[in-house]
Amino acid sequence: METKLLRETEQDIQEAAAILRAGGLVGIPTETVYGLGANGLDSSAVGKIFAAKGRPQDNPLILHVPDASWLARYCRGVPDSAYTLAARFWPGPLTMILPRKDVVPDAVTAGLDTVGIRCPNHPVTLAIIRAADVPVAAPSGNTSGRPSPTCAAHMVEDMTGKIDAIVDGGQCGVGVESTIIDLTCTPPRLLRPGGLPLEALEEVLGEVAVDAALLRPLGEGEKPKAPGMKYRHYAPKAPVTVVLGEPSATADYIAARLGEHTGVICFDEWAGRFAGHVVENIGSSARKDEQARRVFDALRAFDHTDVTEIYAQCPHEDGLGLAVANRLKKAAGFHVVEV
Ligand code: AMP
Ligand code: MG
């Protein structure tokens, strides 16, 4: 299959919408990461997403809508809190889990009786969804297991020949996926940390429970509520070790262990310590927004080098740091040392 590269023009927006309406797959830019979109009401189109990504069938997709007025089309008994969150944070990096209506196919929800729904903050993708006039089911646009794409080039790397088109909407401004909040339980439960900090949700919702799958590797037979959280994810080919602690101490720890083919993910201030090695600096230690924007590109970059092991500095888990640390730990298969 030839994969067309589309741009942010009115003509290309209409073409992307037409492909979606016809049951095809389109790589779409969002503020979080690039998504791999299909008509969310068309089971056979949605099935192609799983094939193109090599995604396990039991891992549901998120439905993307252009505004909160679409919530009631696809969800039952939408609580006031969903509208309050939408008014405050949509369009934006927040996915809400709600009871689904029957119009949403099993292919989207992996058979669950809930659906994840989000309004992305990217003008081109909002225009495509409105022009297609269907909700767009989309997971991240990477091959399953690889780091999520944060620019069109990453999507080209993973999806060329497998999907109909990729819309180049520039670099993702947030860089990590949406925060997922389950509103079907009391208190609401954070299923995935992401581009909207937990603290912002707590301001609106009060108490928020945090799913155990975010904090530690799951035991044998344990089931996370967001099925995606159980898979190894975001991983470069070389094994990753996440080093927790004060940045000066973690820099010392890593510097003492550098072999010829060691790669390093570090904060800008410490990049000089690792001269002569493959270094991906992800921003200053104080700038978690920058770290979120850079983390997936950094993880991907090592696959184009000869590194055989990777050490990573890791931010404190407040604000966006919770999402950055989660992605690094998952990339490491929770191989973490504390210094
Ligand atoms: P991705 O954006 O590629 O990470 O894929 C969507 C994520 O949303 C996965 O981690 C899914 O497990 C999660 N998700 C989607 N729908 C639901 C749902 N109904 N309940 C819980 N998690 C969901
Ligand atoms: Mg994903």
Image (cartoon, grey):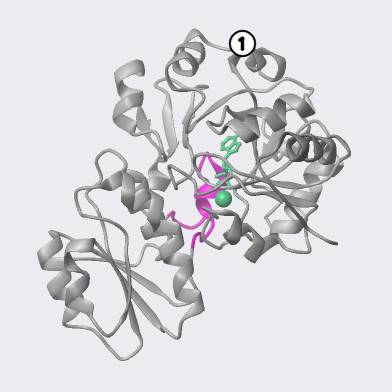
Please give the name of the residue rendered at 49% of the width and 58% of the height, measured from the top-left corner: 220
In the image: residue 295, left or right of residue 168: left
Above or below 338: residue 28: above
Q: Is residue 270 left or right of residue 326?
A: left
Assign the C terminus to one quadrant of the image: bottom left
Write the residue at 16% across / 82% down.
Answer: 256
In the image as oriented, which residue stretches furthest toward the top?
Answer: 80
Q: Position of residue 65 (x, y in %)?
A: 65, 25
Residue 158 point in image, percent of width and height: 65, 63
Badge 1 is on which residue?
77
**Ligand 1 has an atom within 8 Å of the beta carbon of the residue at disc 1:** no
Residue 166: x and y in percent read 70, 51
* Residue beneath the point at 42% across and 75% down: 239
Work out whether 323 lies above or below 84.
below
Q: Is residue 227 magenta?
A: yes
Check the picture and name the quadrant holding the N terminus: bottom right
Residue 76 visible (yes or no)? no
Find residue 61 and report its horizontal and vertical position in percent: 65, 40
Q: Which residues are magenta?
A: 218-234
Asked if residue 38 lies left or right of residue 18, the reply is left
Residue at the bottom extreme? 260
Q: Main secondary structure of the magenta part?
A: loop
> Does residue 67 appear in this view?
yes
**Element carrying mark 1:** loop
Q: What residue do we see at 42% from left, 17% from top? A: 88
Who is closer to the viewer here, 127 or 252?
A: 127
Total number of numbered labels?
1
Q: Is residue 251 above or below residue 261?
A: above
